[in-house]
Amino acid sequence: MPKQLQGQARTDGGRTSLGITVQESLLPAPVDLAKFKEIDPSIVAWMMQYADKEQETRIKAQEADIKLEQDDMAAKMKAQEAAINFDMERVAVTKSEHGIVKTSLWLAFLTAVLFIGLSALLIFLGQNVTGTVFGGVALVLCVQAFLKFGSNRKR
């Protein structure tokens, strides 16, 4: 069945009408088929066979396009899923590293408090030089450990 498209355009101040006929059917109009049949009676059967083959080809092409779109969507979904899994793994690693770092800092702090407490105990027991040296060395080691941790963390 032919489809009529109409349009209007203005040229040089006048009006011009344009008409375009687009045929959506695979077969010619019935009037044209009758004319073809007058020329050759077997041509209509050939046209029918040709139209059937062309329709099958169009259907196969549409099915192939749909299959390609489905495959493309599946590939995109798989890529997004992989990206999400990668992000989840990265977050899990970051959380576990954060837990290790936090625990290490607490242990270093407790060690510093313990060494300073032992130093104070030595000074209280009359070992002034030993307590002072022990406390000083412990303080220097703890400060060095915290500074080293800070420089590693920035990298």
Image (spheres, helix red, strand yellow):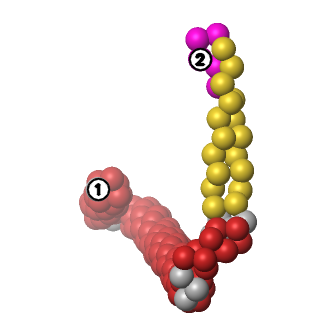
x and y percent of residue 42 in the render? 55, 88
**Drawn side of residue 33 relative to residue 104, left or right:** right
x and y percent of residue 129 in the render? 27, 59
Residue at point 62% right, 71% down?
35
Residue 99 in sight from this viewpoint: no
Residue at point 64% right, 19% down?
10
Asked whether 137 or 153 is in front, the reply is: 153
- Asked if the magenta segment contains residue 10, the reply would be yes
x and y percent of residue 23 in the render? 63, 61
Asked where in the image residue 17 lies, by quadrant, the reply is: top right
Please tell me how crowded label 2 is: few (under 14), some (14-19), or many (20+) other residues with Cα within 10 Å: few
Asked whether 147 or 7 is in front, the reply is: 7
- Asked if the magenta segment contains residue 144, the reply would be no
In the picture of the structure, the residue carrying the numbered disc 2 is 11
**Span shown in magenta:** 9-13
Asked whether 17 or 42 is in front, the reply is: 42
x and y percent of residue 91 in the render? 51, 71
In the picture of the structure, the residue carrying the numbered disc 1 is 155
Kindly give the residue lying farthest to the top in the view shown.
13
